[in-house]
Amino acid sequence: MLLLGIDLGSSSIKASVIDGESGKYLASAFYPKDEMKFIAKKTGWAEQDPETWWTNLKLSIADCNSQLGTKCSKIGAIGISYQMHGLVTLDKNYKVLRPSIIWCDDRAIAYGEKAFNGLGKDFCLSHLLNSPGNFTATKLAWVKENEPEVFAKIHKIMLPGDYFALRLTGEPLTTYSGLSEGIFWDFLENGISGKLMDFFGFSSEVLATAVPSFSLQGKLLKSVASELGLPESIPVSYRAGDQPNNALSLNVLEPGEVAATAGTSGVIYGVTDQKKHEPLSRVNTFLHVNHTQADPRLGVLLCISGTGILNSWLRRNTGNNLTYNEMNDLAEKVSPGSDGLCILPFGNGAERMLGNRNTGARILGLNFSTHTNAHMFRAAQEGIVFSIRYGLDIMNEAGIIPSVIRAGAANMFQSRIFRETLSCMTNTEIHLYNTDGSIGAARGAGIGCGYYNSVKEAFTGLKTVGVTAPDKSKTSAYNEAYSTWINYLKAV
């Protein structure tokens, strides 16, 4: 059997097909080739049209089918990974009512603060394990107050991956993990938080029925199968937010294991079996994909919104059409610490680990006589890693102390400077694997449909493709640069 994984990102939609038996990937494609655009009618807003997602999904699957030829008829299950915390609003005919308010949109922060104060800090942190923050629930609260005519028409709300599954199968479902990432889940009561729903004035009917992340979640509709060139009635058998799914793709499922990613945003995601919270709610806790009441598995997530998006901004605006590899080559010519140039990479909206502040990005210590684009490229990568180190110190307080950091050989982890800086700043080995979100979603589909006899069997073909260890000769220079960076951050 072949397994199809779909990764609905904020930059592109990627599809990959793997051979279930060997775990080898056979086809992969992503669209658009340039990054998907955000709709930003006001500063701090970020929306996307779900129809744009669907268009790019069709292009990605058509490309995979072309690579596979007649083998595409052997695809037997579909898994979905998606950008977390988004809000898709649907009417009674399951038509989209407004563009999706996506994860990095920060208009709902004030609604989260109002709920945090109204429900009480003790309740939020002990029951929700988070402040309500800027998640799906508070985005819906914004719609309720500011677009009452839209709110009145809402029949169901969905996360982006739920919407994709609905389009594929016609089944309006969500997952338990998804409810927790939307901040609808009460961890002590093991169910939807009635107090939060009442506080915002939401009916429970607006939420889709929840199913496990690994489960049969509907079958591909005949009309959609024809549209996508896929076999009719194959099951959608897995879905998860991009960060829990990234952890799955790296076989990070047990307490103490840690996964990382550095795409548009940067994330450290650690698994625990303890229902703990960080006192200032600067990191977030959600149900992991393999959570059960009998065997709890929770994911503690640190997110830095301004990560790869900083690197792409530099490429567009100062890179003179250089490729990322060429930018990395230039950065290699600059010593650790970038000769005093520092960048705070917080230019993609409010940052949870900074108390939901939107400080904006900062370029500091710039010297017109000595600094070049090469310094800028290196300082950007160092600034991103310094942000991750700052957040990891917070995670350490919450009990997440990585002995190894696992990541896919993709995005910024392809940069030697990025890996070296992270390894030196955390005194931890970085292990890279031959996987990504779409491949992880494909493996998840195989688990969910019962193709694999065990979870362990699903990771046949997952291999380490590189290890970066701390370079002791450079650690001192990085630590000195980090001290300077921290002082700049404290001054903001």
Image: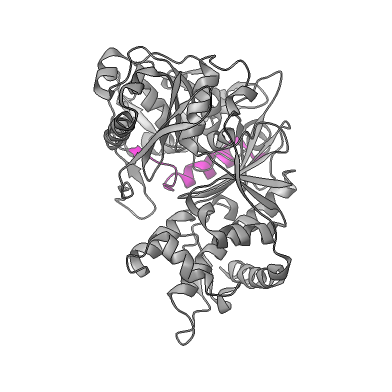
Identify which residue is drawn at 66% across, 57% down.
423
Q: Indicate whether residue 441 is drawn in magenta.
A: no
Give the image location of residue 435, x and y in percent: 52, 39
Q: Is 215 drawn above or below residue 412 in the view shown? A: above
Please name the residue shown 61% across and 15% down the image: 453
Give how far across and how far down residue 84 sits, in percent. 47, 37
Q: Which residues are magenta?
A: 100-121
Left or right: residue 420 versus residue 328 is right
Q: Is residue 206 above or below residue 402?
A: above
Q: Is residue 149 left or right of residue 122?
A: left
Q: Nearer the viewer, residue 385 or 19?
A: 19
> Measured from the top left, where is residue 371 in percent x and y?
48, 80
Q: Is residue 466 above or below residue 202?
A: below
Does the magenta run of residues contain 118?
A: yes
Q: Residue 418: which quarter of the image?
A: bottom right
Residue 463 is situated, as x and y percent measured from the top left of the image, at 60, 38
Q: Is residue 43 left or right of residue 81?
A: left
In this figure, which colouring scheme has been used for the structure? one colour
Q: For residue 57, say whether it is visible.
A: yes
* Left or right: 276 as drawn, with respect to 23: right
